Image (cartoon, helix red, strand yellow):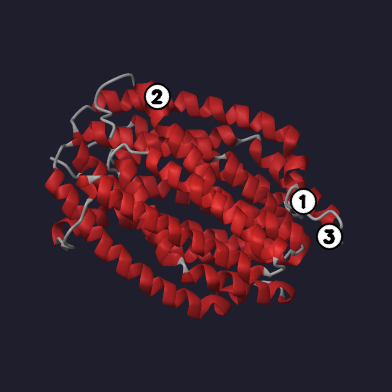
Amino acid sequence: MNDFTKGVIAKQIILFSIPMLIGNIFQQMYNIVDAVVVGRFLGSAALAAVGVSMNALFFFIAALQGLTTGASVVLSQFFGAKQYDNLKTAMSTSIIFLGGLSVVMTVLGMVFTPHMLRLLNAPEYIFDYAVIYMRVQMAGLVFMIFFNMYTSYLRAMGNSRTPLYILMFTTTFNGLLNMLFVVVLGFGIFAVSLGTIITQGLAAVICFVYTYKKVPLLRVNRLVFDKKLFIAILKYGLPAALQLSIVSLASLTISRLINSFGTAAIAGITAANRIDNLAMLPISTLSLALSTFVGQNMGAKLEERAVKGLKTMMATMVGGALLISAVLIFTAPYLVQIFIDMSDVHAAEMLATGQNYLRIMVVFYFLFAFLFAFNGFYRGAGDAVIAMVFPIVSLTIRTGSAYALVYFAGMGPEALAWSIPIGWGIASSASFIYYKKRLWVGKMVTK
């Protein structure tokens, strides 16, 4: 475990974030491997179906992920304040709540999959693929949530290495399983989705067994539901859940716009988004590491050290964003091509759409770094509401800008890329003003 209330700030946060980053990269590889296998061996229609169904799937898991984030913030504060009994009770309460909710969401998701896809205007020639992929993914939702829950709690206590090792093993297993199902055995999109949930189930079991045997503070021998701590979890979790739900709804709205451009555009943007998600991981991971650092220090009444952590990581994140942008500007065509079967009839259009989308967006990664540095600080400082508001502002502006650029400026799929930095710029400016006015003070759960 790591105690962030003393020591060299930059060294602590960066060393803590490295295993998290590698772990997040491996976690992203679940989706990337699926997309590469599908795009290379099953074609553009199947790749487009994966892109559409993943947007719909996120709508169901958004609330659960947000509540998990809220619970981890509570745990990090109790750990920093050395209130270990409250830490255990909070974990038990979250297991009961999130476990039950994930089962309900699984049932609802499987039932309403076709309705969601029709609302998204999914093209008929990819509809059946999308239904199959999404329903199988929904069947494994419980595994996904329990794995994310336990890894979040380990990280809240400063343990970022164990989730990394588990992810390294299970992601490798997932890639081999998908290659076996599709390339060797010739199965279709059902097998790709099934391979992913089998792997997520394995990861959840391994993480639970490790936590129970090796981490006494996170060992729950008897499930207890504490109403007071449940309310505390909701205090931090509901804003995060609401944020992700609104983000999901905005993403679905954007997805509907993407779907109007046809299969090639859907597939090209799906490929570009996979690359974008991977490229932004260093920034978003440092934001999560900063949250843990700030949570522990604010819990220990060390506000000056928490603020110094923000300033240090702000510079690091912006510098990293500029470097990533420079690399992607030159490598975009080669990276997008990894996802495409160049013999496909839509290959040229997919490649052009994907690389143009990526090259426009990556120039503005520094704005994303500003926004997420502040967001990580606000989460750790207990200001869960404002950590929700600014990303929502960003995505809302992005959604409106995308539609305006398409329908009023007559732009094509590139409008979706230009709309992203517009949202980042406005939201990061507002976040800076909020920080300077010190409106985040006094929001901690610990006393």
The residue beneath circle 2 is 311
Which is nearer the N-term, disc 2 or disc 3? 2
Query: Number of numbered discs present?
Result: 3
The residue beneath circle 3 is 346
Q: Give the residue at x 36% y 33%.
A: 435
Pointers 1 and 2 in contact (C-beta within 8 Å): no
In the rendered image, residue 402, in percent from the top left (x then y), is placed at 64, 54
Q: 168 above or below 222?
A: above
- The image quarter containing residue 183 is bottom right
Pointers 3 and 1 in contact (C-beta within 8 Å): no
Label 2's element? helix
Report if residue 62 is visible in the image: no
Given residues 102 and 404, the one toward you in this image is 102
In the rendered image, residue 222, in percent from the top left (x then y), is placed at 16, 61
Q: Which numbered disc covers residue 353? A: 1
- The image quarter containing residue 412 is bottom right
Alpha-carbon span between mark 1 and mark 2: 37 Å
In the rendered image, residue 107, in percent from the top left (x then y), is placed at 43, 77
Which is nearer the N-term, disc 1 or disc 2? 2
Q: Give the residue at x 83% y 55%.
A: 347
Q: 348 above or below 326?
A: below
In the rendered image, residue 320, in percent from the top left (x then y), is placed at 55, 28
Report if residue 348 is visible in the image: yes
